[in-house]
Amino acid sequence: MSQWMLRWNFDRGTYVPGSQGACSIWLENTGDTVLYAERVWLRFDWQLEKAFSQQCEMQIPPRNNFFLTSVAFDIPKTKAGTILYSMGVDLHEYDGKYGIWNKLPTWWSDRKFFIKSIPLPYFKAFVSRGIKPEDRLISDPIVEMIKEWGFNTITVGIEKTADPSLIDEVAKNEIRTSDCLIAIATGRYVDALTGLWRTLEWLHGETGIGFGLDKPLLLLKSDDVAVGGLPGYLADKGRQPVLSFNPLDLSSLQPHIDAVMPSFREWISSKKSQEFWNTIAGAGLLLLIGGIFGFAIGSSKK
């Protein structure tokens, strides 16, 4: 039975969506048979069948550690935050008894590893959301998704404390100094006529301030919530993009956020909203209302 240890080293600690990178790979033969490494593989979590690979064609005697090759890869523009990956290698082991090489099945690491993809520059996002525990149970995970796209978030009552008598002024100042406003609408009371949950007035007021200051706006709402007031009006008129989410399955929101955030950041940078709206419409989303080093141990089975 052959045994080995695969080691690798990424060329930097973090990446930017849309960037390129390289991963250098070594193989240590810890067994007693000669190994021949034909190709190495790097597969990210968004790759189902295809993966980045590089031919190496390297013979490794027992008790030796050889550098194999470097694998080049691309980080898509829509990928930010924690990116999972696994490593693979195509190996042959030498059978000294019969003087032949036996090809082994492609070996993959038995667990996932990760690197970080962080957009630059960082933007300040005012997040309008409820601060009670029942609201934060839903909004906290969503805020983490937002942060992974290069945002420092601020919510009065969470990151920013204020005297109750000054909350309005503090909120206005924080919105004024923010690059955008992202509202998370969660249900607070049931409308007796429609049977839908409605959110509280703080979201309407803070959205109004952001709209008045011409800030890029994004509304994320629970799919059982009816949003009225200015946010509802802006959404109906196509002035504010709205993404719905299932509060019982927040993970389903991640691909929607990944799809719109590159253009939302461009909207913030250029102050032009048309590119963002084109992306939303093209994606069919409108109003649907790490580590740098690693190693793994493997063996053949007989």
Image (tube, grey):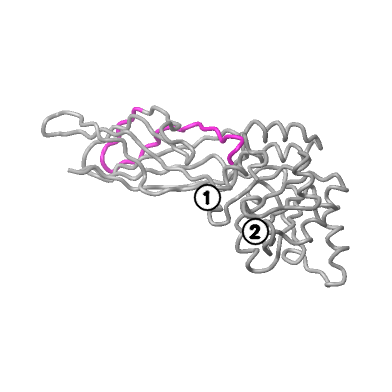
Give the amino acid at mark 1: Gly
Q: Residue at x 60, y 63 (%)?
A: 137
Q: Which of 88 and 12 is in front in this view?
A: 88
User: For residue 267: magenta?
Assistant: no
What residue sits right under mark 2 in the picture?
195
What is the C-alpha distance between the residues marked 1 and 2?
A: 45 Å
Q: Which residue is drawn at 83% across and 72% down?
A: 164
Question: Is 201 left or right of 259, judged from the image as shown?
Answer: right
Q: Residue at x 71, y 63 (%)?
A: 130
Q: Position of residue 296 (x, y in %)?
A: 37, 47
Residue placed furthest toward the left: 97
User: Which quarter of the picture shows residue 92?
Assistant: top left
Q: Dot 2: within a 10 Å radius of its alpha carbon, few (fewer than 14), some, or many (20 or more) residues? A: few
Above/below status of 265 relative to 144: above
What residue sits right under mark 1 in the picture?
290
Task: Give the mark nearer the N terminus: 1 vs 2.
Answer: 2
Q: Position of residue 169 (x, y in %)?
A: 88, 63
Q: Is mark 1 on a helix, strand or loop?
A: loop
Q: Position of residue 104 (x, y in %)?
A: 25, 35
User: For residue 76: magenta?
Assistant: yes
Magenta span: chief secondary structure: strand
Q: Nearer the viewer, residue 163 or 124?
A: 163
Residues in magenta, as a range: 57-79
Q: Which residue is drawn at 52% across and 35% down?
A: 22
